[in-house]
Amino acid sequence: MPEGKIIKALSGFYYVLGKEGIIQCRGRGVFRKNKVTPLVGDEVSYQAENETDGYIMEVKERKNELVRPPIANVDQAILVFSAVEPDFSTALLDRFLVLVEYNHIRPLICITKVDLLDGGIGKLEQYAADYRNAGYEVILASSETLEGLEDLYPYLEGKISVFAGQSGVGKSSLLNALRPELELKTSGISHHLGRGRHTTRHVELIKIGDSGLVADTPGFSSLEFTEIEPTELNFCFPDIEQISEECKFRGCLHVSEPKCAVKAAVEAGGIPEYRYEHYKDFLQEIKDRKPRY
């Protein structure tokens, strides 16, 4: 039975890339019965008499999966945030980072639209340095001037990457700059709403370079911590997790406990105060979450 990878899902059809090319498939009814939904990125077995009449017979075991965007087997997440329009938000970036870390997906931060900064990039460079010190790779880029694109290419080779971020930050524009013949639809900021208009309506894997596959995904502006427990949040902040090993009490949540190494590091400037404030805000949000039954 031939095997392949789902590279696009649209209107109930799954487009599977196999040795014979791209085959249009439907999912078997047994998937619905067993509550298995094939996802872009899935490795599957399929049957097909021709390129437009195939059926997915089996979905292979996944190494990970995301709900929003719906995609599986992701190697890394390129978190695309704009310098302006919409303004760079460390709170939203940290929210994305927590969810990516929780799903054991390697994040890479890409800050776009640096060409639009009127007052220079000094403050942005400081943020970039903070996140690099926390253990993250950070690239400053522009789809207009092509700044930073050469730095991004090597990270994409041989991996499935998901481009994720708030609507209007320039994900599709960045993909167009990486591969101009795509001509993906882009749209500016809605000044009435203060955020970007959604231009991507489905998830699709796009080939970049020799061996990279990138998913342009629908933008979204809110993410909830529906699965993360209070004691797990620590592990989603690498800079906090590293220092937490020096806390006096095991299971320290770094809020009111005495002799907390994390709080001491914040006071000493070792952890940016805004990162710690986001950690506390997220922790409270998780504690306030309604229990699941």
Image: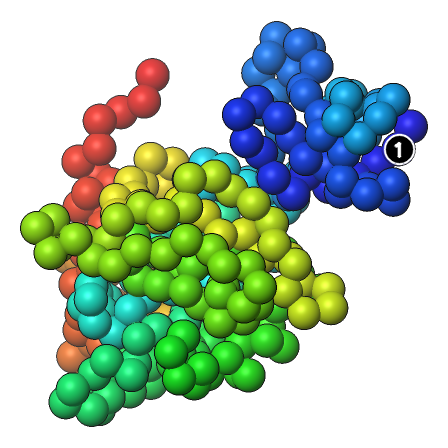
> Residue 203, position in %: x, y?
51, 42
Taking 189 as reference, is 130 left or right?
A: right
Q: Quadrant of residue 275?
A: bottom left
Q: Is residue 243 visible?
A: no
Q: Is residue 200 left or right of residue 66?
A: left
Mark 1 belongs to which amino acid?
Pro
Above or below — where is 88 with respect to 10?
below
Helix, strand or loop under label 1:
loop
* Residue 122 locus on image (x, y percent): 22, 91
Residue 20's image quarter? top right
Q: Which residue is mark 1?
A: 2
* 98, 43: nearer the viewer: 43
Residue sitting at 60 percent across and 49 percent down? 205
Against 31, residue 138 (above or below) is: below
Instruction: Name the side, left or right, on which 17 lies relative to 208.
Output: right
x, y percentage for residue 60? 74, 33
Quadrant of the rendering where the C terminus is positioned: top left
